[in-house]
Image: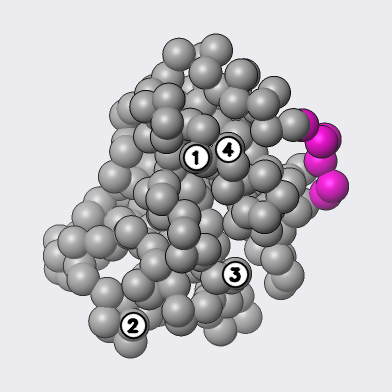
Amino acid sequence: MFSSIQGEGPFTGRPASFLRLSRCVPPLCPWCDTRHAWGPGTWISVSAAAEKILAHGNRLCVITGGEPFLQWESGLNLLEAYLIEKGITVQYETSGKVLIPSEAKGFKVCSPKYLSGTWQYRVENNTRADCFKFVVRDDPAHVAAFVKTHCLPETSVWIMPMGALRNEQMDRLAGVWRFCVDNRFNFSLRLHTLIFNNQKG
């Protein structure tokens, strides 16, 4: 749990509290930059998590993982309700490998994963996610195909250049921008990488 800036997607630039929940869903991404979240993690009560989040003083809380919705019935649902009651905007970062709970009221950002030529994704999330976010390298054609196959509105799609380091992201920036213009997608920097490089939060 830490306080930083939301560097991706529709909330880019907003100060945010980040709650990273443990455990993920196989197959795991070989390029993952948060592998420490794959393990069992450290237990924390809903009240203790809420207290720490509120102490940061941010009006946005990003709940990520791992795969956060694995813990929906283990207290995440209660934490969401409490934070919203306190006036905190809740944003989820999910891979879409599991079904997004229909009762989740936070803003759901879905980042489907393309592994070994296949999208690891629950199609039911087409209507449960609020927007879709993709990190791309040099050939993003499979992303455009995914958007078309699932009939996603271009206004709900955000594209970012891949790069765990500042220079890697900058090298891909122009190409990704052109891809967004050609397909009428939203372009997003990974602002936290540009500011902090690969420093862990």
Disc 1/disc 4 C-alpha distance (Å):
5 Å
Q: Are marks 1 and 4 in contact (CB under 8 Å)?
A: yes
- Disc number at residue 98? 3
Question: Label 2: which residue?
Answer: 150
Q: Is residue 13 above or below residue 56?
A: below
Q: Which residue is the site of mark 1?
A: 81
Q: Main secondary structure of the magenta part?
A: loop
What amino acid is at disc 3?
Val
Secondary structure state at the residue bearing disc 2? loop
Quadrant of res 21: top right
The answer to whether the residue labelled 4 contacts the one labelled 3, judged by CB atoms less than 8 Å apart, is no
Which residue type does callout 4 highlight? Leu
Mark 2–mark 1 Cα distance, whole angstroms, equals 30 Å
Report the residue at 67% width, 55% height from top. 73
Q: Secondary structure at mark 4?
A: helix
Q: CA distance from mark 2 to mark 4?
A: 31 Å
Please state which of residues 69 and 185 is positioned toward the viewer in this rendering.
69
Q: N-terminal of the two: label 3 or label 1?
A: 1
Percent position of residue 79, x then y: 58, 37
Q: Residue at x 61, y 19 (%)?
A: 51
